[in-house]
Image (cartoon, helix red, strand yellow):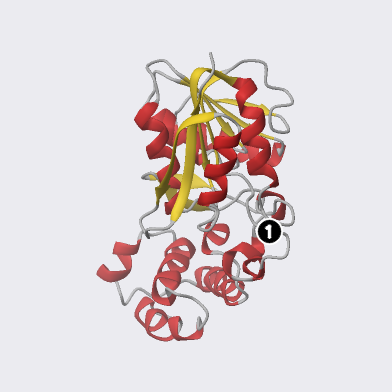
Amino acid sequence: MRISSILKTYPAQLIHSSSPRLDVEILLSHAIQKDRSFMYAWAEYELKPVEIIKFEKLFEERLQGKPIAYLVGKREFWSMEILVDEHTLIPRPETELLVEVALNVLPKNGIVFDMGTGSGCIALAIKKERPDCQVIGIDKSLNALNIARQNAQNLTLKIKWLESDWFSKVAIKADIIVSNPPYIAVHDPHLMQGDVRFEPQSALISGKDGLDDLFYLIDKSRDFLNPKGWLFLEHGFDQGLTINSLLKNACYTNINTYQDSNGQDRVSGGQISFV
C-alpha cells in the first residue's frame, strides 16, 4: 500500500467530514511518523505492515466520527502544538480571539486567571506573549490539569496550575480573568453533531439555556478582580446581547462584544467599576 493510493482512495469514504483529504493526510502522517511534506515528496513510499495497521485503525475511528485531534493527540493553537485527550476540549481557532482581547489590556507584570483552563491553551498563549505576567490556569479536573502541565513543560512556559471548582480554592486577585466556560444548553441539538459528540460534556453544557456558568463567572469574578480589572468570556454566537446585559446589570463598565473571523459574536467582556 503506497501513499499515493491511500490519498487517492480513502478521502472519498469520509462523507461526513468537511475536509476528507486533509483528515487522511493528518492520519497518515501520524501513522508513518512523517510530516505531510514527506507524502508529497515520496508519494510512492510503501507503508510497512505495522504502519498500515496503525493507519487503518485511526481511519476506522475517524469513520465513526472521532475527532482528528483526539486521534493524533494534539491540535495547533496560537502557533503552538497543544496536547489534548478526551478530558479536554479541542482548541479552536475562534478561541484565539479571547487571547487577543486579553492581551490588549493586560498590564505589565499583571496577574491572569484562566478559569476552566482544560488543555491550558489560553493560559499558555498569554504566557507566551507576556512572560512578565503571572498566569494561573484553574480547573476542577485533575486529568485536564495533567495535560495542561505537560503542555507547559513541552513549551517551556511557566504557569501555575490550580485544581479548583471555579474560585473555591483561589486565594488571590487577578488583573484579568478569562474563560471559555461551558455555554451550550442541555438540549441543544449541536451536542449530537461533529466533534462535540466526543468532547467532555462537563466542559460544554451549562444548564437549560447554556448561561449558568457564564452568569456565575460574571457575578463571582467581581470578588477576585483587582481595581479596574477585566473579565473576558467566550460564549455562543447568539449569546452576545445577553452577556452584555448581564455584565451591565453586574455593574461592569467598558463593556464590549468582539466578533470572530466568521463575523460571529464570540467574546464579551468588561471592567469592574469599583475600587
Q: Report the amino acid beneath label 1.
A: Ala
Helix, strand or loop at disc 1?
loop
Instruction: Name the image quarter holding residue 170.
Output: top right
What residue is at 39 percent from the left and 19 percent from the top? 107
**Residue at point 45% right, 53% down?**
265
Give the x, y percent position of residue 268.
Answer: 48, 42
Where's residue 57, x and y in %?
A: 59, 72
Residue most extreme to the left: 41
Residue at 54 percent of width and 18 percent of height: 274
- Residue 83 horizontal/vertical position (percent): 53, 46
Mark 1 = which residue?
A: 185
Q: Is residue 245 above or below residue 113?
A: below
For the question of whether residue 252 can be seen, the reply is yes
- Classify mark 1: residues with Cα within 10 Å, few (<14), some (14-19) or many (20+): some
Q: Is residue 179 above or below residue 53?
A: above
Tally of numbered discs = 1
User: Residue at image x 47%, y 71%?
Assistant: 48
Q: Quadrant of the N terminus?
A: bottom left
Whether residue 148 is visible here, answered yes or no, is no
Vertical order, 114 against 26 (above or below): above
Q: Quadrant of residue 73?
A: bottom right
Q: Position of residue 205 (x, y in %)?
A: 69, 54
